[in-house]
């Protein structure tokens, strides 16, 4: 499968994980870590389920990938996430030394669903991303807000 097509398939999987996360009682976020043409680990948001405010999809996927690869460095890996990483996940990805981050929905889509990413970015943003050591790219799929739609449609959601 060509690289770009493979990446779209991974993004589809991240969005699917994010949407099923809502049904499973988690937040509407999903992520995976891949290396070469192989998915190493997946993750979804488990903040309310585990009473852990750091249990974001990206952090969960990176923790699982490190366990899987038996290393603390994800050098050579790509982090594919259903939504633009929040500042915490972005910092974690920098610490993990991932090669690249690809996201679909953005901080504005997340804000519509009631998530604070944009507010935190406004606090922290100082340098343009073009100056960052890790490339951060948007792969905007048409169904990128499906997890948020599922979230907003869920009447018994636990907001956090
Ligand atoms: Zn996050």
Image (cartoon, helix red, strand yellow):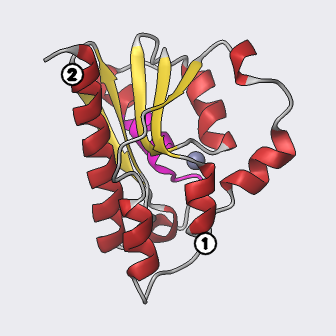
Q: Estimate the x, y position of residue 42 in percent, counting from the top left.
A: 31, 41
- Of residue 142 and residue 154, the one placed in the foreground of this image is 142
Position of residue 8 relative to residue 37, above or below, is below
- Of residue 66 and residue 149, the one placed in the foreground of this image is 149
User: In the image, is residue 115 part of the stretch drawn in magenta?
Assistant: no
Q: Where, quadrant-wise, is the N terminus in this rendering?
A: top left
Magenta residues, dominant SS class: helix
Q: Estimate the x, y position of residue 103 in percent, counting from the top left.
A: 47, 37
Which numbered disc, 1 or 2, marks the residue that appears first in the sequence? 2
Q: Which residue is mark 2?
A: 38
User: In the image, is residue 62 part of the stretch drawn in magenta?
Assistant: yes
Q: Estimate the x, y position of residue 53 in percent, counting from the top left.
A: 60, 59
Q: Which mark is residue 11?
A: none
Q: Residue at x 83, y 24 (%)?
A: 127
* Mark 1 and mark 2: Cα distance apart in space: 33 Å
Quarter of the view holding residue 134: top right
- Of residue 77 and residue 64, the one placed in the foreground of this image is 77
Position of residue 25 relative to residue 50, above or below, is below
Q: Where, quadrant-wise, is the C terminus in this rendering?
A: bottom right
Q: Residue at x 43, y 73 (%)?
A: 151
Q: Estimate the x, y position of residue 112 in percent, counting from the top left.
A: 59, 66
Q: Which residue is mark 1?
A: 160
Residue 5 falls left or right of residue 44? left
**Which span of residues is magenta-colored?**
53-64
């Amino acid at each position: 499968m060509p690289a770009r097509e493979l990446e779209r398939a991974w993004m589809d999987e991240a969005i699917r994980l994010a949407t099923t996360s809502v049904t499973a009682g988690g937040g509407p976020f999903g992520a995976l870590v891949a290396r070469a043409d192989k998915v190493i680990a997946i993750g979804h948001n488990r903040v309310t389920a585990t009473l852990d405010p750091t249990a974001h999809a990206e952090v969960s996927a990176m923790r699982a990938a490190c366990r899987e690869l038996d290393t603390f460095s994800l050098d050579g890996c790509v982090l594919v996430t259903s939504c633009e990483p929040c500042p915490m996940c972005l910092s974690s990805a920098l610490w993990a030394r991932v090669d690249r981050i690809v996201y679909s929905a953005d901080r504005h889509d997340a804000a519509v669903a009631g998530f604070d990413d944009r507010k935190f970015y406004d606090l922290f943003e100082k340098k343009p991303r073009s100056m960052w050591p890790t490339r951060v790219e948007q792969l905007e799929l048409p169904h990128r807000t499906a997890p948020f739609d599922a979230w907003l449609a869920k009447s018994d959601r636990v907001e956090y």
